[in-house]
Amino acid sequence: MTQARARRGPGRPRREEADGQQRLLDAAVTLFAAQGFDAVGLRAIAAQADCDVSMVAHHFGSKAALWRAVVDSMLPQLHINLAQVDAICQARGEPLQCRVVRAIGLLFDHITASEAMARFVMRETSEPGERLDYLVEHVIRPVMQHYTPLWQEAVQAGLFPPLSPPLLHTGLVGAVAFLLGSQAMLAQLSDPPPDAAALRDAFCQSLFTHFARGAAEPHMPR
C-alpha cells in the first residue's frame, strides 16, 4: 500500500520543526538579554516563540541546553566576522590608524547586526559561573584573540595607552555596545539624532583625539 505521506529521512527535520526551533532560539536570546537567565521561564520563551512549551524539551532538552544552543548559534556568523578581523590585521600595507578605525568599525557593524545577541553577551558577563565560562571559551576569548595583534600594534605605536589587550579590548567593546544601546536616549537629546555610522565616526574621532600622540587623524570610512 502506498503511503499518503512519505516519511522524512533521518537528519532532515520538517520545515515547520526547523522553523519552530529557530523561533525558540530567537525568543530565548531576546528574553535572556532583557531579563536574564534565571528570570525567564520556559513557558515565557515558548509563548514568545508561538510554540508549545513541550517543544523546548523536544528540541533542546532543558533551559540550560537552550541557553547553550543560543551561544552555539552565534558561532557560524562569528567565524565570518573573525575572518574580516584577520584580513584587517594582516593588511600591513595600510596605515595602522586606518586599520584600527576599520576594526572599530567592524565592532560597530557586528554589534549593530545583532543587537539582541550583544545585549545577551553583555548581561552574561556580569554573572560569574558556568554560563560565563562557556561564553568566554566559545565567544569572548576567540574574539579577543583575533583582535589582540592589532591592539598590541596600536599600543606599541602610541595610538592607544599601554593597556593590556584584555582590558583594552573589553573597554572598546563595552563603549561601543553602550553607545549603540543608548540610541533611543540620544534620539531625544540630539538634533538630528545620530545613526550608527555617526556614532562610529564620533567614537573613533574621540579615541584618536585623546590617545593619538602626534599621529594624523585617520580617514573615517563609510
Image (cartoon, rainbow, N blue to C red):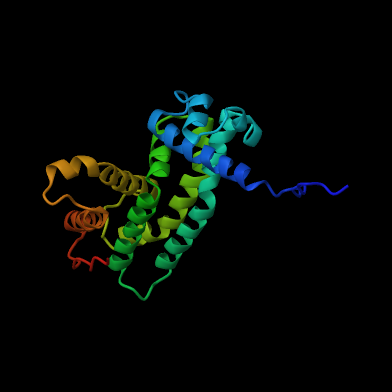
Residue 193 rendering spot, x and y as whole percentages: 17, 49
Q: Residue furthest right?
A: 1
Residue 134 appears in the figure: no
Closer to us: 159 or 134 = 134
Quarter of the view holding residue 122: top left
Closer to us: 212 or 26 = 26
Q: Residue furthest left?
A: 191
Residue 180 rendering spot, x and y as whole percentages: 28, 46
Question: Vertical placement of 15 versus 24: above or below?
Answer: below
* x 46%, y 29%: residue: 128
Question: Vertical placement of 56 versus 115: above or below?
Answer: above
Across the whole image, how many numbered discs are drawn on residues? 0
* x 54%, y 46%: residue: 73
* x 35%, y 56%: residue: 109
Horizontal side, residue 199 vs residue 150: left or right? left
Horizontal side, residue 48 vs residue 156: left or right? right
Which image quadrant: the C terminus?
A: bottom left
* x 70%, y 50%: residue: 12
Closer to us: 140 or 184 = 184
Residue 54 rendering spot, x and y as whole percentages: 62, 28
Residue 188 appears in the figure: yes
Question: Vertical placement of 148 versus 175: above or below?
Answer: below
Horizontal side, residue 221 vs residue 39: left or right? left
Horizontal side, residue 156 vs residue 71: left or right? left
Residue 35 rendering spot, x and y as whole percentages: 40, 28
